[in-house]
Amino acid sequence: MSSQKLLETVTQRVRGTVCAVPFIIITEPIMFLHRLYQITLVSLAFAFASTTVNAEPVVDKPAPLFSGAAADGSTIKLADLHGKTVVLEWTNHECPFVVKHYESGNIPNLQKDAVAKGIVWLQVITSAPGKQGNVDGETARKLNAHRGATPTNTVLDSDGSIGKLYGATNTPQFFIIDPQGVLVYKGGIDSIPSADQSDIGKAENYVSAALADLAAGRKVAKSSTKPYGCSVKYAG
């Protein structure tokens, strides 16, 4: 190759390199910002979806529908109970607060009275395997027989899906759904947060009051109260 040809080749390559440098400098930040924008959008969408899925049910709005395995081997579907008043009772037989209301007969009496009036009363056991209160269907039925409990049925929610759907945090905790499928009450059983049986007679029973309002065709006066008791024993 002649000296002149070599000089022209080198000059062309240098010019190409010089021209390429600004292009790289300009485009790389733009590509990075575009990628960051995409990641941000995906993160926000995921956060919104998570918040929506785990949002607590709202009083005076339709109760979240669910399907769950029952202690008697059947499948409970809330949609199938349309037209009936439904009580959901989160429970854990080993929780001292639950023991208080069962040993005293408080919850069994509420169950008996409600079921006699055609109300569907569902216990919900959300304790995960290996956690306090986790039982199989047969054990749940034996426990109820021993305690004189008469719920319509017991829903086994060991994976916590129904508990999370309703934002259940405590045992005992109650949700009441009217015949149109609307949530009309959520919260605790009464007004005195203790494990002492002697407090039951002095407390305002929110569950019985809500059921009385509903039966009389009145709006539930105290439709949302603070639950108390043991934490729901979710997995993890």
Image (spheres, rainbow, N blue to C red):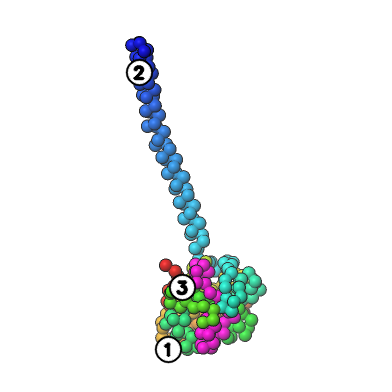
Outermost residue toward the right in this view: 83
Label 3 crowd bin: few (<14), some (14–19), many (20+), radius 10 Å: some
Q: Position of residue 135 (x, y in %)?
A: 49, 78
Query: Going from the N terminus, do you reach mark 1 or mark 2 first?
Result: 2
Tag 1 near tag 2, CB within 8 Å: no
Q: Amino acid at mark 3?
A: Pro
Is residue 64 magenta-colored? Answer: no
Q: CA distance from mark 1 to mark 2?
A: 98 Å
Can residue 222 be seen here?
no
Query: Does dot 2 land on a helix, a strand or a loop?
Result: helix
Query: Going from the N terminus, do you reach mark 3 or mark 1 first?
Result: 3
Start and end of the magenta stretch? 140-164
Q: Residue at position x 51%, y 67% from top?
A: 161
Question: Residue under circle 3?
Answer: 129
Q: CA distance from mark 3 to mark 1?
A: 33 Å
Q: Position of residue 173 (x, y in %)?
A: 49, 76
Question: Residue under circle 2?
Answer: 10
Q: Nearer the viewer, residue 29 or 223?
A: 29
Question: Residue under circle 1?
Answer: 198
Q: Is residue 117 left or right of residue 40?
A: right
Q: Position of residue 79 (x, y in %)?
A: 63, 69
Tag 3 near tag 2, CB within 8 Å: no
Q: Amino acid at mark 2?
A: Val
Q: Residue at position x 60%, y 73% from top?
A: 75
Q: Is residue 42 left or right of residue 111?
A: left
Q: Residue at position x 46%, y 72% from top?
A: 128
